[in-house]
Amino acid sequence: MSKRSSVNSSSANGEMSKAVRSSDQPAIDKQKTLLSADVGHFSLVRAMHLADLITLMNGFCGVMSIFSSLRYCLGDARSYDNVWLALAFLPFGLFFDFFDGRVARWRNKSSLMGQELDSLADLISFGVAPAMVAFTIGCRSSLDTVGLTFFVLCGLTRLARFNVTVAVLPKDATGKSKFFEGTPIPTSLFLDGVMAYWVYNRWILEDLPFGTLFEGSALEFHPAVLLFMIHGCLMTSKTIRIPKP
């Protein structure tokens, strides 16, 4: 998750943030005016800040990863090119996720729309896309998909909680939140690295690590999915607090 929302929320606490609030307000008001206008061509495009466009690139990487996973499912299972492509898009999504926050602070422009875009793009790139890669490489049973859906919904809940609580979390001298509650959703890149290692060793499909439980039955399940479920629980934890860099 990028630091864009901390720019937007810093105006909610303390006298220190009044200067930021006053400088951000004209940009926010202009965006609201453009978005709420009844007329005007391309009003949505004109309302976007540069940081918003960078956030969309994060979402682009996530969607392209999903399409690459689908191409592998529809193609030759012996050719891993599309799997590698699906995995390769995700670190680029992280790059854009970090970069949009830097641009927002550099231009001193933030918005509620940018905060919502950031969360939605993160859900695609670090929630749905990794789950799709897991399905692609062999976690395809009914119970597997339930476990992967649990992971995605944990990410969704974690992002929603962040948007609600970011304004009241303790801030440092720059107005940024001091810590993350639960592991940030971009930490799912660790799972992407694990899956890349499996693909490199060709441990996919029938050779997926940890084997298969109740194979051939309605309860067929791949224990590898537990990695995603555990990560989902870590994201929604209230007690885990990770200091922000």
Image (tube, rainbow, N blue to C red):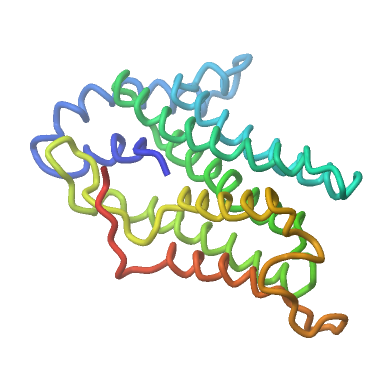
Is residue 114 toward the left or the right of residue 71 in the image? left
Quarter of the image with the C terminus in it: top left
Give the percent coordinates (x, y) of residue 217: 85, 84
Q: Quadrant of the N terminus?
A: top left
Q: Would you place residue 94 above or below residue 188 in this image?
A: above
Query: Residue at position x 57%, y 28% from top?
Result: 57
Position of residue 204 measured from the top left corner of the image (x, y, whole percent)? 75, 59
156 or 81, nearer to the observer: 81
Residue reaching furthest front? 201
Of residues 71 and 23, the one nearer the viewer is 71
Q: Quadrant of residue 104?
A: top left
Q: Is residue 138 left or right of residue 131?
A: right
Q: Nearer the viewer, residue 50 or 216?
A: 216
Task: Report x, y in % for residue 196.
Answer: 63, 49
> Who is closer to the viewer here, 142 or 91?
91
Residue at horizontal 65%, vertical 65%? 149
Q: Residue furthest left?
A: 15
Residue sitting at x 73%, y 77%? 221
